[in-house]
């Protein structure tokens, strides 16, 4: 069974540029999570979906970040006008509503100069 | 919101020694997971242990829910155990939940 896949694996931007991250969850998993992990910190939840619906986006900086999951499968996280403080690894995870375990992708490492 | 404190922040062992990692959390949690994060960044779930004691391979986790603490014991450490160990808790009902992570313990095992 294929795991969670993410792309790109790395991104380097100048401040003010935009970037999109893509996540393909494990087939059949109805819940998808996006986390931000700054260097030397634990992951922090940004947003999560059940199917195509946003369940909680309270930690998503809504002025510059957006996330969609239009068909309840793949998801895209976008940063408009990136700032140096956005430098972090962005992790995607998925889970099945009948299980507790979240399965993580390899992450996208973002550097904003 | 929920807070998770992990100790020690880093630990250096010689191969064959045992490791004891601690996790303390601020409020009642119905879910508790230990994760391993490799130096390359990939995160893998090791154990789900909201209460009691659970074993898998060389890992033993003990969670005392009333005292809001959990430990992860790694026996006979190997160099391949090097990486960051993260504790995460979740408190909402149902199968899908929000995880709050600690900052992790960086383990280095030397030959």
Image (spheres, helix red, strand yellow):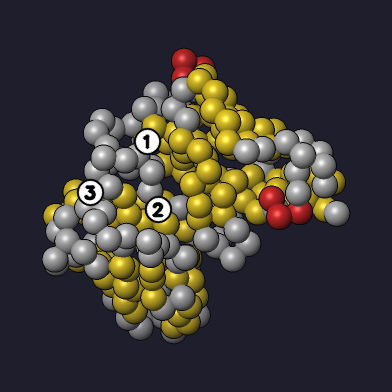
Closer to us: A34 or B75: B75
B100 to the left or right of A40 = left
Q: Which mark is residue A103?
A: 2
Of all residues, the one furthest to the front in this rendering is: A1
Residue with the mark numbered 3 = A56
Read off the chain for label 2: A
The residue wearing badge 1 is B90
Q: Is residue A94 above or below residue B72?
A: below
Q: Nearer the viewer, residue B40 or A97?
A: A97
Query: Secondary structure beneath disc 3?
Result: strand
Mark toward the viewer: 2 or 3:
2
- Viewer-closest of B21 and B95: B95
| Residue at the (31%, 67%) spot, across then down | A24
User: Could you tell me which chain the residue with mark 1 belongs to?
Assistant: B
Task: Judge left or right: residue B51 versus residue A60.
Answer: right
User: How far across and how far down the image is residue A19, in percent?
Assistant: 34, 79
Along the horizontal axis of the image, is B57 left or right of A7? right
Chain ID for label 3?
A: A
Viewer-nearest of discs 1 and 3: 1
Residue positioned most to the top: B66
Q: CA distance from mark 1 to mark 2?
A: 15 Å
């Amino acid at each position: 069974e294929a795991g969670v896949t993410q792309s790109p694996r790395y991104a380097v931007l100048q401040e003010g540029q935009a970037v999109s991250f893509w996540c393909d969850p494990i087939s059949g998993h109805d819940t998808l999570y996006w986390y931000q992990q700054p260097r030397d910190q634990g992951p922090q939840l940004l947003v999560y979906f059940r199917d195509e619906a946003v369940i909680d986006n309270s930690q998503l900086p809504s002025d510059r970040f957006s996330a969609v999951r239009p068909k309840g499968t793949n998801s895209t996280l976008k940063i408009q006008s990136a700032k140096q403080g956005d430098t972090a690894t962005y992790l995607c995870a998925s889970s099945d509503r009948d299980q507790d375990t979240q399965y993580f992708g390899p992450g996208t490492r973002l550097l904003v100069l | 919101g929920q807070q998770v404190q992990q100790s020690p922040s880093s630990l250096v062992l010689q191969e064959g020694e045992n490791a004891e990692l601690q996790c303390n959390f601020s409020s009642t949690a119905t879910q508790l997971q230990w994760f391993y994060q490799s130096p390359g960044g990939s995160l893998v779930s090791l154990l789900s242990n909201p209460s009691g004691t659970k074993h898998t391979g060389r890992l033993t986790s003990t969670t005392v829910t009333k005292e809001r603490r959990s430990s992860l014991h790694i026996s006979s450490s190997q160099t391949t155990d090097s990486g960051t160990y993260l504790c995460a808790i979740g408190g909402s009902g149902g199968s899908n939940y929000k995880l709050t992570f600690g900052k992790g313990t960086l383990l280095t095992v030397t030959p």
